[in-house]
C-alpha cells in the first residue's frame, strides 16, 4: 500500500498557484511599461537628471520666477528605476491644464520620437517676501513695541490678505486676537482704535476746535476711518484714526 501525504501535496499546489500569480503580474507590468522600454539599452536611456533639470529650467523661466530671487523652485523626485527611451528632439515641457502656477503644482515632460512617452513630475513654486512678524506670543490688549516685532523673510500668502508693511501703523496697536510667535502681521491683525473702546474725537477748523467722547463701533488702524457713536447725543459719525483711541474730524469753515 502506498501512502499519500495530503499535507505536502496541498503545499505544492499552493506554491504552484503563487508562482502562476507572480508570472501573471510580471507579464501585466511588462505590458504597461513596454512603450518606455522598447529598444532601451544602457546607451539610449533618457537621463533622469536631464529630465529634472529641464523641468526646473522651464519653471524658472516662467513670468513669476524669471529673475526673481524671492522665488524658490523645487522639482520632485523621479523613480530611478524608470527606463525611458532617449528622446531624439529637445524635451517638450509644459504645465498640465488646470494646475496652479504657484505652491504645489506639477509639470509635464513629453517626448515624441523615437518612442512617445510622457511623465508628470510634482513640483513646488514658493514665493517669499519681507514682512513684520511677532517675536513672541501676544494677546489682545497688549500694545506692540519694537521689542515685539521683527522684519523677516516669509512665504507669500496665497490668499487675499496682505502683510502690513508700514511699521508706524503697527507700533502702539493692539492685536485683535492672540498671535503666536512668528505670526505674520496683516492689516486686519491689529487695531489702534478697537470696537467697544472709549475714544476721544477732536473736530476743528481754522476758527474753533472741540473734543467729544464716543464709543468705537468698528476696528481701525492709523489713517483708517472708524465709525464712532457720540457718548452724549448717541449720533453716529465717521472719524479718522490719528493715534491710540484718538480720532479727528475736519470741519470745513465758512465765511
Image: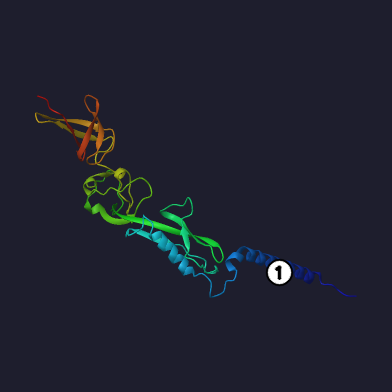
Residue 187, quarter of the rendered image: top left
Q: How is the image coloured?
A: rainbow
For residue 83, above or below residue 213: below
Question: Quadrant location of the N terminus?
Answer: bottom right
Q: How far from the left and from the top, in percent, is residue 141? A: 27, 43
Location of mark 1 (residue): 19
Q: Nearer the viewer, residue 200 or 67?
A: 67
Q: Nearer the viewer, residue 124 or 238?
A: 124
Question: Quadrant location of the C terminus?
Answer: top left
Q: Residue at x 62, y 63 (%)?
A: 32
Q: How far from the left and from the top, in percent, is residue 81? A: 55, 69
Q: How far from the left and from the top, in percent, is residue 76? A: 46, 62
Q: Nearer the viewer, residue 214 or 107?
A: 107
Q: Residue at x 44, y 62 (%)?
A: 55
Report crowding for label 1: few under 14, some 14 to 19, many 20 or more residues within 10 A (C-alpha).
Answer: few
Count of numbered circles on the image:
1
Q: How far from the left and from the top, in percent, is residue 211? A: 15, 31
Does residue 70 appear to the left or right of 255 in the view shown?
right
For residue 226, above or below residue 151: above
Amino acid at each position: 500500500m502506498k501512502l499519500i501525504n495530503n499535507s505536502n501535496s496541498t503545499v505544492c499546489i499552493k506554491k504552484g498557484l503563487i508562482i502562476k500569480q507572480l508570472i501573471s503580474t510580471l507579464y501585466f507590468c511588462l505590458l504597461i511599461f513596454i512603450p518606455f522600454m522598447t529598444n532601451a539599452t544602457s546607451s539610449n536611456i533618457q537621463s533622469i537628471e536631464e529630465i529634472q533639470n529641464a523641468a526646473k529650467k522651464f519653471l524658472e523661466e516662467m513670468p513669476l520666477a524669471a529673475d526673481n530671487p524671492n522665488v524658490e523652485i523645487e522639482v520632485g523626485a523621479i523613480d530611478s528605476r524608470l527606463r525611458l527611451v532617449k528622446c531624439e528632439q529637445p524635451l517638450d515641457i509644459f504645465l498640465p491644464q488646470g494646475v496652479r502656477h504657484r505652491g504645489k503644482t506639477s509639470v509635464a515632460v513629453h517626448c515624441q520620437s523615437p518612442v512617445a512617452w510622457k511623465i508628470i513630475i510634482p513640483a513646488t513654486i514658493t514665493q517669499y517676501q519681507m514682512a513684520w512678524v511677532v517675536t513672541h506670543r501676544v494677546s489682545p490688549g497688549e500694545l506692540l513695541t519694537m521689542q515685539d516685532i521683527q522684519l523677516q523673510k516669509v512665504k507669500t500668502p496665497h490668499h487675499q490678505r496682505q502683510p502690513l508693511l508700514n511699521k508706524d501703523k503697527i507700533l502702539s496697536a493692539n492685536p485683535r486676537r492672540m498671535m503666536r510667535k512668528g505670526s505674520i502681521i496683516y492689516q486686519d491683525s491689529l487695531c489702534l482704535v478697537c470696537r467697544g473702546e472709549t475714544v476721544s474725537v477732536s473736530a476743528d477748523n481754522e476758527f474753533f476746535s472741540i473734543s467729544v467722547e464716543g464709543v468705537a463701533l468698528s476696528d481701525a488702524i492709523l489713517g483708517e476711518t472708524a465709525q464712532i457713536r457720540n457718548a452724549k447725543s448717541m449720533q453716529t459719525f465717521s472719524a479718522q484714526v490719528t493715534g491710540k483711541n484718538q480720532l479727528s474730524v475736519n470741519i470745513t469753515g465758512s465765511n
